[in-house]
Structures are given as C-alpha cells and as structure tokens.
Image (cartoon, rainbow, N blue to C red):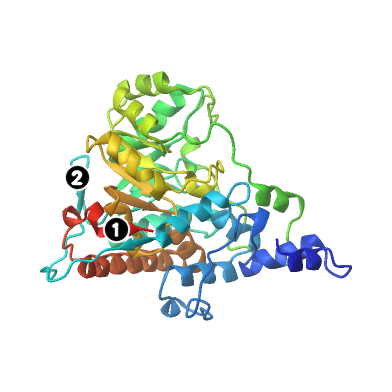
Amino acid sequence: MSDKADAAGSSDHTSRRTFTGGLLASGVAGGWLGAVGDAVALPQRARIESLDDVLNIAHLDQAASRRLSAEAYHFIVGASDDGLTKQANRLAYQQTKIRPRRLVDVSTIDTSVELFGRLYASPIILAPAGNQQLVHAEGELATARAAARKDHLMVVGQMSNFSIEEVAATGVASWFQLYPSANREFMLHLAARAQAAGCGALVLTIDGPSRGNHEAARWFRSHPVKGQAKATGAPGKLGNFEDFAGPKGIGDPALDWEAVAALRKQLELPLVLKGIVTREDARLCRKHGVDGVVVSNHGGRQEGNGRATLDVLPEVVDELGGRMPVLVDGGIRRGSDVFKALAYGADAVCIGRPYLWGLGAFGQPGVEKCLRILSAEFERTLRYAGTPSLADISPQHVWRD
C-alpha cells in the first residue's frame, strides 16, 4: 500500500480491517490484496447504473465491484502473493502493438475456428470457473445459457455448483475441466459423465500441486466485512461430486508425466493440459500423447511466477509446431487482446474474469454483454488489421517495444 494508505489504515479512527474492507468494496485496493480491479480512465470511471451503460469490460468490472460484497468481488479478482503475475498478464497486452495492413478486402469477416474436428463460431472461449453461485444465484447455468445464445464454447469447471449434466441441458457447446485426484477412479468417473453429456474435450488443470497463497481470502475468513449484502446466500452444492461413492479428494502433488500418459490411454475424449508455460513441458506434452494445451498461469491465482502468458506463448507455439491446438488465457480485456494472442500463435483464447464480472453485475444478460463486446471489438480489430479470417493473422501483425 502507499504511505498515505498505510497511514489511513493505522489511524486511531480507522482500523485496518475497516479500511481494507472499504477499499475492497470500492474496487481500488492493491498491494498484498492482489491489485483488485484494473486501472481505468474516463469514460470507464463513469457510474454504471444499468446494462445499457456498459460500453466495455472495464464497465462490467466497475458494476460488479459496486453490486457484489467485497468478499464476492475479490473471489473474481483475487490473485496470489502480491498479484504481480496477474499484473504481468495484463501489462503484456498493453505493451504489444498491432501492425495493420491496408487495402485488404475486409467486407466479410470469418471468426470461426476448428478444434478437434469441430467448428466453433468464435475463438473466444469461456474458461472454467467454479462456485459461480458465489456471485449470482443462477451461477453456471446463467453463464451456459449466455454462451449458448452467443454461440461460444464453454469449459465447465469441475467445481461448478451445477452438474455437468445440468449445464449441458442448456444446449451450450462444452468441454469439461478435470482436477488431478489421488483417486484416479474419481477422475475417470467424471470423464465418463462429461463424455456422456456431450463434452468435446477434457481440460486437465495441472498448475496447482499446492493451493495458491490467497491472502485476501484468508483475511476475509478472519475479518468478515459486515453490513454488505452478498449477491446470493451461501454457495450451493458441488454438482459434479454428488454421484460418486468413493473418495473425491482434489489435488495430487504426486501426479507426473507418466501418470498423465496412463490417464490419456484410458480416455476417449481429447485431453488438453491447462497450465503449460514452458518449451520443455510443451515438448513433454508431445512425448506423452497430450492432444492440446492451454498456456495458463491460472490468471495469477496460483503461483506468483511473474511471467505473463502472452510472453511465454511463443515458445510453447514454436515447440509444438502446429501439432496440437494451443489456447491461452490471462489478462484479456479487449477484442484487440484476442487478436494479439492469435498473432502470437494461439488458436483460441479463454476468458474468465470478464464474464464473471458480467455475471456478478447483471446475471445472464451481463455474460451475454461481455461476449457481445469482445466479439464486436475483435471483429473491428480484424478489419483494421486487414485480416478477414483467423488464418490471415500472423506474427507480422504485432510488434513489441
């Protein structure tokens, strides 16, 4: 915190607890609480009263910060340690510039992308996020309905409050997230349910051999902020955990590449590893039969390695050489960011915080607005850059100082 903030926090009249809660409620806290919210300039700072006022993702962030309790809001924006990895994710996009080409016929724009033999209308995918009832009563169902209406692929979180079957019933095109478990039978059980529900791939999240250092979450457990209404009551069930009688533990620090290869042989759906950030691990993905990767640092929520996903994307793409789909997440706030990620070699991108802000502020219509904004910005960027389709985007279209 700044010296001024420290002084305020230690004032005889304002306790650190009250001061911190106030900052979180306004969405401007930083420092050890994980750099809450994104710095914005006018007109982003305008007061957002309704969905009609929302012009960009920053507006959804601001609306969510006003409507949610501090704890629920920080569930979306929180990061590990000092939040530097989360900040690096965003800064990498801000430092990357676009090199537009002129006099190209962009009267028709094609944003479709093929992944594992299936054509999707957009490369903008909804990343897995669990416990969405913490920010809205309809949780993942509202998110799925919005994704279905706007024709976007959704990766359903294993820790979702609603089951994969309930989410699939909305008609959304979906993949399913898996977390490692020492009980492999539980993982296979979930994989079978996902396949039966019509999911097109499994996304094994491998960047959490330990829980991230979520200091703000620990603070809230010890110092609940009183007098603030939550968006919902207590979080609901974990729908994907209710139809299995054996141990359901999440996390397996003993998981290694041989275990991934063994798991892959037992699965029928394509297996995507989420959390790859180095050339070396990309090479091991090829060796052990993995079908795709998500270049991800969990949005800065787990380890504080300080490296932006956009910065490490080129080495992963170079190593894989087009042999499997490469997705990337972390820090995307504009449609132009989507373009930059694809220019660095990603086949598609995953977004998390932007649609959760929409969900927390306005429910399903907020998620739809998020997707509509990013899609419109992306299509506009394609036209300005002189790239009528995703296949036309190349590394020559971006520049980094």
Residue at the image position 73 percent from the left and 62 percent from the top = 20
Left or right of 305? Residue 323 is: left
Q: Is residue 375 above or below residue 156?
A: below
Q: Amino acid at mark 2?
A: Arg
253 in relation to 5, above or below: above
For label 1, the residue is 398
Determine whether the residue tagged by mark 1 lies in a helix, strand or loop: strand
- Locate residue 315, reporting x and y percent: 34, 40
Q: Is residue 357 visible?
A: yes
Could you say which quadrant of the image residue 261 lies in?
A: top left
Q: Secondary structure at mark 2?
A: strand
Front in this rendered view, residue 102 or 372: 102
Q: Which residue is mark 2?
A: 118
Left or right? Give the position of 65 relative to 103: right
Q: Residues within 10 Å of mark 1 (few under 14, many from 20)?
A: some
| Image position, residue 290 (x, y; %) | 31, 29
Say left or right for 58 vs 368: right
For the point 43% across and 68% down, which residue is it? 57
Q: Is residue 131 visible?
A: no
Residue drawn at (24%, 66%) of the image? 379
Q: Mark 2 and mark 1: span between their CA atoms?
A: 28 Å
Q: Nearer the viewer, mark 2 or mark 1?
A: 1
Marker count (numbered): 2
Marks 2 and 1, the one that precedes in the sequence: 2
User: 16 or 392: nearer the eye?
Assistant: 392
Residue 41 coordinates in the image, percent (x, y): 50, 76
Q: Nearer the viewer, residue 56 or 346?
A: 346
Report if the CB atoms under discs 2 and 1 are less than 8 Å apart: no
The x and y percentages for residue 156 are: 40, 46
Disc 2: CA contacts within 10 A as few (<14), some (14-19) or many (>=20): few
